[in-house]
Amino acid sequence: MKIYDIAQEVFSCAVYPGDPVPERFEILKKSDGAVCNLSGFQMCAHNGTHVDAPYHFIDGGDTIDEVPLEKFIGYAFVKEFAGDIGAEDAERILQEARAAEEASGKEGAATRILIKGKATLTEAAAKVMAQNKILLYGNESQTVGPEDAPLLSHMAMLSEKVVLLEGIRLGNVPEGVYFLNAAPLNLGYFDGSPCRAVLIEGM
């Protein structure tokens, strides 16, 4: 069994333009005579590797604590792609995912799609993914869709309750089927959450 850590380190992570940078601060220090070292931090729920809940773009949508954990945990398919993912590309990716799921016997792999590389999900592709009832879509960018216009791709997915896993790092992960754990923090009423996403090979 091999574990791939696909999460960014929080305090050196990439940050979506305009979002606050994570900050760490010391509350107690042993060197100052305190009983222990105690740290705090401040960050945006969408810094680094994180997941989006429907509420991120949809008033009244599910918050992160309301999204079933089954969406974040289970078999996933990793596919490498560069450039804009169009509708036909999305169809091909899903076909490959279904074939890989069948060949591996790993049920659910075609319902969690992770894209390796510098790829942008177009609105048309997002609609294809959503129409095919996937549970989760993940990418290396800090956002799904064009960075300067993320609304339509997000809405196409989140309106169908597809979980978005953004800011993952798949550089050392070959294409194929893996067991994914991208469980978020249990943050009540939040629109998203950081997560320590991992892929497990051989499980």
Image (cartoon, helix red, strand yellow):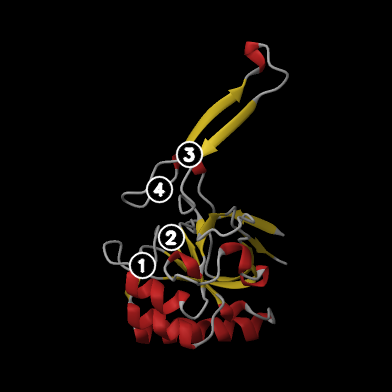
Q: Is mark 3 on a helix, strand or loop?
A: helix
In primary-sequence order, the first of circles 4 and 2 is 4
Which one is in front in this view, the residue at disc 4 or the one at disc 2?
4
Between discs 1 and 3, the one toward the N terminus = 3
| Quarter of the N terminus within the rendering | bottom right
Q: Name the residue under label 4.
A: 14
- Please name the residue that numbered disc 3 is placed on: 11
* Residue located farthest toward the left when viewing the structure as drawn: 148
Q: Is residue 110 above or below residue 19?
A: below
User: Which circle, 1 or 4, is nearer the viewer?
Assistant: 4
C-alpha span from label 3 to label 4: 9 Å
Q: Mark 2 points at which residue?
A: 140
Q: Tags 2 and 1 in contact by the CB under 8 Å rule? A: yes
Instruction: Count neighbours of disc 2 (C-alpha within 10 A) and say few if under 14, some if 14 to 19, many if 20 or more.
Output: many
Quadrant of the frame with the C terminus: bottom right
Three-letter amino acid code of the residue under disc 1: Ala
Residue behind mark 1: 119
Q: Where is residue 94 in the image (x, y as percent from the top left)?
A: 49, 84
- For marks 3 and 2, give the CA distance: 17 Å
Q: How far apart are marks 1 and 3 (CA)?
A: 24 Å
Q: Tell me how far mark 2 sits from mark 1, CA to CA.
A: 8 Å
- Give the residue type that dot 3 points to: Phe
Q: How crowded is mark 3: few (under 14 residues within 10 Å), some or many (20 or more)?
A: some
In this view, 152 is above or below 22? below
